[in-house]
Amino acid sequence: MPEKRKASRNPMEIKRRLRIAERELHHLNKAQWSYAKSMLKFGLVAWILGISAFFLAVWMADAELFGVTQSVWTSLLVVALAAPVTITAVFVRRIAVKMKRLERIRRGLLTEYQKAVLRHMEHVAASKG
């Protein structure tokens, strides 16, 4: 298990790390929605092409299969539509987990920064008084 870095007492270093975390969080948030939209578009196109290929193959083999195996191919169509949506949801969930971790890090850094600034102000006030 990796060791945690020692908390920096320098407010400027904490502020720099806080900005990095906020920038990465913003980037992940923006990327999450564009990724989800593109994955869903790709999934829909793949589903349409797959359905077209399925019907073409059934039609070329024997058009009477539609009546006999209707319950089987209807459930296959539903599963085929659900697969791209499920895959997209899994990948978007992975990004959401990363975003939650970054948000937790950001909150910790913000708290650490506020404490460091207060310590600095107390030090300045004590040295003047």
Image (tube, rainbow, N blue to C red):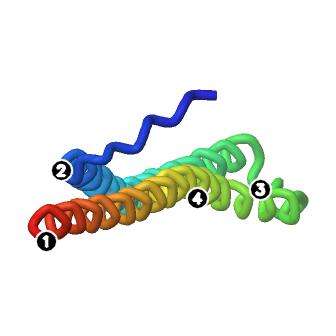
Task: Give the spatial CA distance, label 2 vs label 1.
Answer: 25 Å
Residue furthest to the left in view is 128
Foreground: disc 4 or disc 1: 1
Quadrant (top left, top right, bottom left, bottom right) of the N terminus: top right
Question: Which residue type carries mark 3?
Answer: Leu
The answer to whether residue 51 of the structure is visible from this angle is no
Q: Position of residue 2 (x, y in %)?
A: 57, 28
Give 57 or 115, whichever is nearer the viewer. 115
Q: Residue at x 66, y 42 (%)?
A: 57
Question: Observer-nearest residue: 89 or 109?
Answer: 109
Q: Which mark is residue 76?
A: 3
Q: Secondary structure at mark 3?
A: helix
Which numbered mark, 3 or 4, is in the foreground of this view? Answer: 4
* CA distance separating discs 3 and 4: 20 Å
Residue at (59, 45) in percent of width and height = 53
Which residue carries the number 2 mark? Answer: 12
> Which residue position is annotated with label 4?
89
SS for dot 2? helix
- Say which element carries label 1: loop
Residue 51 percent across, percent down from the top left: 60, 53
Is residue 73 left or right of 2 when viewed as pictured? Answer: right
Q: Which badge, 4 or 1, comes first in the chain's sequence?
A: 4
Which secondary structure, mark 4?
Answer: helix
Q: Are marks 2 and 4 in contact (CB under 8 Å)?
A: no
Instruction: Name which quarter of the figure residue 127 lies in.
Output: bottom left
User: Nearer the N terminus, badge 2 or badge 1?
Assistant: 2
Tell me which numbered mark, 3 or 2, is placed earlier along the sequence.
2
Residue 78 position in % (x across, y down): 72, 63
* Amino acid beneath label 1: Gly
Look at mark 1 in the image and give the residue it sits on. Answer: 129
